[in-house]
Amino acid sequence: MQKENIYKTLFLSTFKLSLFTFGGGYVIVPLMRKKFVEELKWIKEEEMLDMIAIAQSSPGAMAVNTSIILGYRLKGIAGALFTLLGTVSPPLIIITIVSVFYEWFKQNAIVNLMLKGMQAGISAVIISVVFSMAIEIIKGKRYIFILLMALVFIGSVIFDINIILMILLSAFVGLVDTFIQDIKKSKNIKGGN
């Protein structure tokens, strides 16, 4: 990481990602992953998955939460401020412009067709994110989370179970698993001494 350019890179990267991304956090987060994990190699894949999990479980927009956590992880509070500004500036600018021309946008057939096309693209990106996260879970052989992912999907799509209940159940399973993993690690450390 070059110190003189890191703040500029944080701001410009999140600004560009936010400017050209439609569909919210599920679209921008994989692009952040590609930029900061694959291209810049500033953070590891596991860290990015952890950041996404924390961002999803925190109140607020997932893209904004992820960018704040990412910026904080890389350069503390200043980094978080730069990534926050980079992420929220494009939507604020776009919404301001749209609000001025709202009546025209609402009645324009071309704009409406363009938005319909974007919906299809966003669906593809969300499916891609689900598969990439699932592959990471499968690689780690964390079968409890594979099962949990399938059960939450079935509960949501087929049985229409309240999403808040599923989030709470998932959080509970994650806490229990973390507790069990910590116990195993401490036993391995004691057994190795």
Image: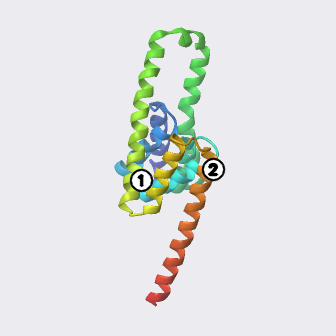
Q: Amino acid at mark 2?
A: Leu
**Which residue appears at 49% of the width and 78% of the height?**
185
Residue 70 picture location, percent across and down: 51, 51
**Which residue appears at 54% of the width and 43% of the height?**
156
**Which residue appears at 58% of the width and 24% of the height?**
95
Q: Nearer the viewer, residue 104 or 117?
A: 117
Horizontally, residue 19 falls left or right of residue 88, namely: left
Of labels 2 and 1, the one closer to you: 2
Which residue, given by chain and number where applicable, does mark 1 sit on? Answer: 2
Q: Quadrant of residue 172?
A: bottom right
Residue 28 picture location, percent across and down: 47, 39
Q: Amino acid at mark 1?
A: Gln
Q: Nearer the viewer, residue 79 or 44?
A: 44
Q: Nearer the viewer, residue 179 or 13?
A: 179
**Which residue appears at 43% of the width and 33% of the height?**
123
Packing grade of label 1 (10 A; few <14, some 14-19, many >=20) is: few
Look at the picture and state if 36 lies above or below 46: above
Which residue, given by chain and number where applicable, does mark 2 sit on? Answer: 165
Horizontally, residue 186 falls left or right of residue 146, namely: right
Label 1: which secondary element: loop
Residue 118 picture location, percent across and down: 43, 25
Asked whether the beta carbons under mark 2 and mark 1 sit within 8 Å of each other, the answer is: no
Q: How many marks?
A: 2
Label 2: which secondary element: helix
Is residue 44 visible in the rendered image? The answer is no
Q: Nearer the viewer, residue 143 or 45?
A: 143
Label of residue 85 in the image: none
Q: CA distance from mark 2 to mark 1?
A: 44 Å
Residue 130 picture location, percent across and down: 42, 45
Circle nearer the N terminus (2, 1): 1
Quarter of the image for the N terminus: give it.
Answer: bottom left
Look at the picture and state if 65 lies above or below 21: below
